[in-house]
Amino acid sequence: MKANIEFISKMIDAKKLEEEAIISLFPKNMQKHLNVINKEVQALLIESVVAMVGGMNNLSDPSHNTENNKTEESSSSVRKVEIG
């Protein structure tokens, strides 16, 4: 088990170094943009995983699931609007 943890830790360190090496190939002003994009992608992935896990929890409770469907249907209804 300890060997697996050490291996995972070394792989994470290697990926961080790889990321730094790739970012260093770009001009300084682009490096800042790439770092911001990287943080946004990480946040998006975390939100996606949390949403998927939350969705899985909702599947186990059928009453909660139908309430969500009704709310989503009413908030996403489309109606025709005439202009002028």
Image: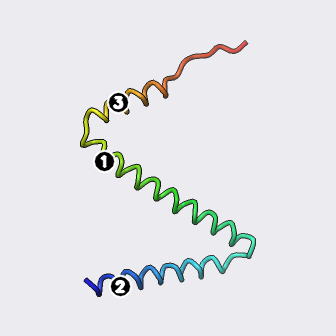
* Above or below 23: residue 67: above
Q: Which residue is mark 2?
A: 7
> What is the distance, in whole Å, between disc 3 and disc 2 at their CAs?
45 Å
Please report contact status of discs 2 and 1: CB closer than 8 Å, yes or no: no
- Foreground label between 1 and 3: 3
* Above or below 6: residue 73: above
Ranked by sequence position, the earlier of labels 3 and 2 is 2
Q: Which residue is mark 1?
A: 56
Which residue appears at 66% of the width and 79% of the height? 25
Q: Nearer the viewer, residue 45 or 84?
A: 45
Three-letter amino acid code at disc 1?
Met
Ranked by sequence position, the earlier of labels 2 and 1 is 2
Q: Which quadrant would the C terminus be assigned to in this image? A: top right
Three-letter amino acid code at disc 2?
Phe
* Crowd tier of the residue under label 3, counting other residues whose Cα lies within 10 Å: few below 14, some 14–19, many 20 or above: few
- Foreground label between 3 and 2: 3
Three-letter amino acid code at disc 3?
Glu
Give the secondary structure at mark 2. Answer: helix
Q: Which residue is mark 3?
A: 67
Which residue appears at 52% of the width and 59% of the height? 43
